[in-house]
Structure formats: C-alpha cells, structure tokens
Image (cartoon, helix red, strand yellow):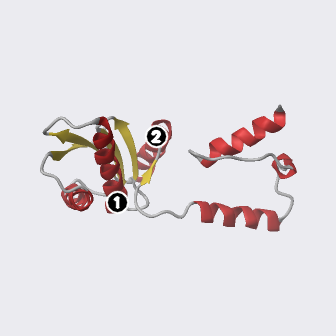
Amino acid sequence: LQNADKALYNVKQGGKNGYCFYSEDMNKTELKSDEDFERQVNNLKLQCEHKGAMNVEYREFIRIYDLISNLVRRYNYKMQLFMITLIEKDDVELEEHEKIMSCVENAVKGAMRAVDVSVRFSGNQMLVIIINAEKEDFIIIKNRIKAVFMNLYESNNVELRFQLADVNNM
C-alpha cells in the first residue's frame, strides 16, 4: 500500500492526466552526491520550460499570489491582477461555451509572458497575475489578449471584459 501511495504522489505532482508505475527509485529520497544534485537541477530546468502564461489550478494560484504578494511587500515588485469575463451575446450550447473558454485560455497563454500566471476562476472567468507591470501596461496586455482571442475564435457574438484590481496598495 505504501508503494501505491508513492506512485499516486508522483502522479499528483506531475499534474493532470498522468500515470505512474511504482519503481524502487521512488524509495530514494535523498541526493547522495553532487552528481545527483546536478541531475535533479537539470530535471527541474527541463520540466519548467514553458511559453506563455502558466495556467494553474485555483489552489496553486492562491499560493503563487501569496508568494508574489510577499515579493511586492519586501522587494518592491509590481503586480497587477485582472479578471477576464466572457460575455456571450446569444445563448450557446455547453460544448460551444467550453470551446470559447478554451480559446480565452489559449489567448491568455499566447499573449502573456512565461512569468505571468492564470487560472480559470469560473465557468466564464479567468484571473491573471502580471508581474513587474504597471497599470499603463494593462491596456497593451488587454489589446494583445483580445487580438489573439479574435484570431482563435472569430465571432461577433462574444465579448471579453477586463477588470483590473489595484493589489499593490492593499
């Protein structure tokens, strides 16, 4: 049963839609040499390469928000938090709605930097954290997201609304 727990833990750490078979290597919990440490660092680097905004689950988003908030307080970083709301002018089927929201997620990912973080907040909303950006940058970011979205989903029946929160003064 402990072996199954270790395999399940590995799957959870890897994210959605994963699987893992137990192996004896899972019992190794400490790095024995500089070579082991270097291998681990290289593995981390490989796993962390992504383009565009990092889309995470809500619990992870809260933890990342907390981390960045601490950087804002301690080191004078800038952080912007905004919400994107999808407005559908006509009723659409659930399948079409999910397709549209997927386009919103992809637009955020495609228009943002790898240091920015997003989460699907509700059925028609996303939250996005932008690091080291000023309020003035928000207009450029908003327009870039809209442009990418319109390339992904061509319809006049939907609108993206953006709300910016002033989190640096909270």
Q: Are marks 2 and 1 in contact (CB under 8 Å)?
A: no
Q: Which residue sits furthest top?
A: 1
Residue 69 locus on image (x, y percent) = 42, 43
Please indicate whether residue 156 sits to the left or right of residue 106 in the image.
left
Q: Amino acid at mark 2?
A: Asp
| Residue drawn where x is 40% and y is 61% of the image | 52
**Which of these two is toward me, 152 or 8?**
152
Q: How many marks?
A: 2
- How far apart, in angstroms, are the residues tagged by discs 2 and 1? 20 Å
Q: Secondary structure at mark 1?
A: loop
Dot in front, 2 or 1: 1
Q: Amino acid at mark 1?
A: Met
Please indicate whether residue 19 sits to the left or right of residue 77 in the image.
right
Residue 24 locus on image (x, y percent) = 87, 49
Q: Residue 72 got which mark?
A: none
Please indicate whether residue 133 sits to the left or right of residue 32 in the image.
left
**Which of these two is toward me, 111 or 100?**
100
Q: Is residue 81 visible?
A: no
Q: Earlier in the sequence, mark 2 or mark 1?
A: 2
| Residue drawn where x is 84% and y is 50% of the image | 28
Q: Secondary structure at mark 2?
A: helix
Q: Residues within 10 Å of mark 1 (few under 14, many from 20)?
A: many
Residue 124 lies in quadrant: top left
Q: Mark 2 — residue?
A: 66
Q: Residue 112 got which mark?
A: 1
Q: Quadrant of the N terminus?
A: top right
Q: Is residue 43 visible?
A: yes
Residue 154 locus on image (x, y percent) = 19, 57
